[in-house]
Amino acid sequence: MSSTRQNINNYKELLEQYINTMDEASLYQAEQYSKASIQHNVSPDKIIEEHYKALVELFPNLDERVKASFQFLIQTMISYSVNYQQTEELREKQLELKTEIDVAANMQNTLLSTDVPKVENIDIGAKSVPAKLMNGDYYHFVQDDEGNIGTAIADVIGKGIPAAFFMSMIKYAMESFPEDRMYPKIILELLNRVVERNVESGMFVTMFYGLYDINKHEFYYATAGHEPGFIYRSQIQAFEEIDAKGLLLGVKKDTKYNQYVTHIQQGDMIVLLTDGVTECRSGDRFIEREEVLEVIDQYKEQSAQNIVDNVYKYLERLQDFKLRDDFTLLILKRNS
């Protein structure tokens, strides 16, 4: 007797026993049969088919309409089994992809990590939070051999894993530059060549780069199409926009960038950010930049890191704790 026929007879015996007794022991046998079927990769439609054949043998005069309903059910379950298998395979692939993305996100955090400089009289706060696992924003601090602070903040146009790892290339390109003083326009022009040679089609980078002279308290800066920052002027107790223009990195090979300089007085703050801060959305409305500056102004007497953290908490609450874009905010505050 074939194994298929043996299965039918086994099922038929179990079914007949249950019909005659309606007891718990028969149901237990059904559970064991189900477990054995799973171990042997028996699909649901095969079990229904066995049920149908057993019924026909037990009840030869079974109503034709009942037989037809079972044929309908068997065809339904055949389709279900195929779709279920495809769904399980897709779920497994999604889990594998999520694992790979988790690994990539951890690698990104390691590759793009940067230390906030500890400089007398200059208080620095920084925070960067991705809207998803991978961060399309980037910030980095470097110090030259005189202790001056180089500050980069960037945003990749084109998100996802390629954009995230492209940022790591930019970071290591920056760290390969000489440690003596390099002004922002030079930094951007060098990075533009790196990006133009290596960037994927349709991927561009906005970047703001500033150099803070810790002795003269002069701030040199240049931009490659990045979101304008602000300077809080303590003497007039007002914010002024950092007015600078420049082409995105990677658009044109021999792009030249303009450089600007401004003096930072005691109590002034430099505010650098990405568009995830100034274009934050709450419901159907976009948060105005003035609203963000009001929050900064509210906490201006606190440390730079507390200011940054409070701005993030404020915007996070407005978005019901679900960021719609990457958030990056840097503040350099001259205390004396």
Image (tube, rainbow, N blue to C red):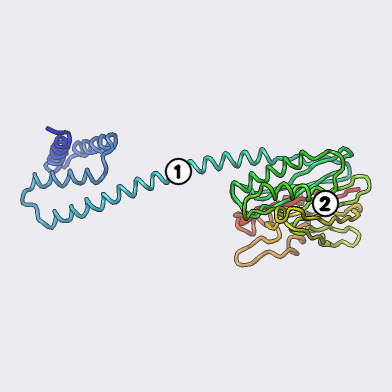
Q: Give the mark, 1 or 2, whose residue is nearer the N terminus.
A: 1
Specify whether 183 is left or right of 86.
right
Instruction: Mark 1 vs mark 2: give the one in front.
Output: 2
Q: Residue furthest right?
A: 216
Q: Is residue 241 above or below residue 149?
A: below
Which quadrant of the structure image shows residue 272?
A: bottom right
The residue under the point 13% across, 43% down is: 54
Coordinates of residue 73 in the picture (x, y in percent):
22, 53
Kind of residue indicated by mark 2: Lys
Q: Crowding near pointer 1: few (<14 within 10 Å), some, many (20+)?
A: few
Q: Is residue 96 above or below residue 269?
A: above
Specify whether 101 is left or right of 56.
right
Mark 1 and mark 2: Cα distance apart in space:
45 Å
Q: Residue furthest top?
A: 1
Coordinates of residue 198 in the picture (x, y in percent):
67, 47
Q: Which residue is mark 2?
A: 185
Asked if the residues shown at circle 1 and circle 2 are in contact, with their CB atoms under 8 angstroms apart, the answer is: no
On the question of residue 318 being in view, the answer is yes
Coordinates of residue 4 in the picture (x, y in percent):
17, 37
Q: Residue furthest left?
A: 61
Kind of residue indicated by mark 1: Lys
Q: Which residue is mark 1?
A: 93
**Front-lying residue, 207 or 312:** 207
The residue under the point 8% across, 44% down is: 57
**Front-lying residue, 40 or 155:** 155
Q: Is residue 165 above or below residue 232?
A: above
Coordinates of residue 166 in the picture (x, y in percent):
65, 45
Q: Secondary structure at mark 1?
A: helix
Q: Secondary structure at mark 2?
A: helix
Specify whether 159 is left or right of 329.
left
Q: Quadrant of the N terminus?
A: top left
